[in-house]
Amino acid sequence: MAFDGRLLSGVSVLTAVVEGGSFVQAAEILGLSASGVSRAVARLEARMGVRLLDRTTRSMQLSDEGRRFYEQVGPMLANIEEAATLASGAASAVRGRLRVDIDPFFAQLLLTERMASFLARYPELSLELVTREHVGDLIADGIDVAIRFGEPWRSSAIARKLLATRVLTVASPGYLRRYGRPKHPSELSRHTCILFRDPATGRPFAWEFHKGRKILPVTTPVRLVLSDVGSMLSACVAGVGVAQVLALSAQPLLDRRQLVELFPEWRDETFPLYALYPSRHQPAAKVRAFIDFALEAVR
């Protein structure tokens, strides 16, 4: 297939459709009509001899061939954009739309109150925060960077660790007055425990206790399972039971004595926070800027 500018133009339109989620949204991004966008995609499909989008009256999504094609050309278009920025002498310019897939509790805990200053710092940037239960395909979903707790699953994304926060076992003073304070993790089998569901597996996280190199697994009775960190902390403060929480989220409650750490000698387990972005030689300036912003927040 001989290369010409119309092919690159068609790929750019297809990318706008995927990232925008519709022909109408792509038209607004590109300054075209929706019918013009549709014709450009149809010309690209005719030139390639393959259907890239499956369309119905109510929905539109990439076909299997279209997804494979988009996953290949997406990083290339990003590299072209980055090369153009470098050639223009504005490599540090932070502009355009930035889509971030972010852990909802991290956003609420550390980022929301700082968002105004971040946007003021980069007036040419528009920010879209997306919260999902787990990270999908960053390129296919049009995500520039994801901020997530836990070790990343195998993928082509580049992972950068932002922090590792301790895992603490806590209960409220009221719960301890009613049921007594366990002196050793093995005594938790006689207590009500609040478990957190792992979004990657759909099962509750197993409880472990770390002291140096020693690891002690503990089987806890399943009385309450939650998938929202805020709800888990609220239930624990209300005296429902014992919970394992991240120090990053629980420290204010510990400082106010609304929660009590139970086993300070078994607190060597940590849980990481990562920034994930699509594989490429250099992340875009807007991605670097947001990662730096997240690092400022956690510090």
Image: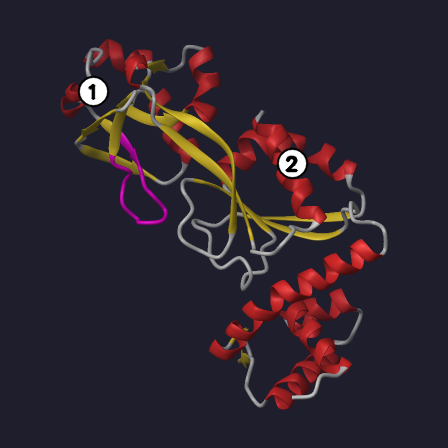
Q: Residue at x 50, y 40 (%)?
A: 274
Q: Secondary structure at mark 1?
A: helix
Q: Which residue is mark 2?
A: 292
Residue 241 visible in the shown view: no
Q: Quadrant of the C terminus?
A: top right
Q: In this rendering, would 292 be left or right of 108?
A: right
Residue 153, position in %: x, y? 40, 50
Q: In this rendering, would 140 be left or right of 83?
A: left
Q: In this rendering, would 242 be left or right of 296?
A: left
Q: Secondary structure at mark 2?
A: helix
Residue 21, position in %: x, y? 60, 66
Dominant SS in magenta? loop
Looking at the image, is 263 positioned above or below residue 38? Answer: above
- Magenta stretch contains residue 204: yes
Q: How far apart are the alpha carbons under marks 2 and 1?
A: 38 Å
Which kind of residue does numbered mark 2 sit on?
Asp
Q: Which residues are magenta?
A: 194-206
Q: Residues within 10 Å of mark 2 (few under 14, many from 20)?
A: few
Looking at the image, is 198 positioned above or below residue 106? Answer: below
Front residue of this view, candidates 272 and 51? 272
Residue 222, position in %: x, y? 20, 35
Front residue of this view, candidates 68 and 233? 68
- Magenta stretch contains residue 197: yes
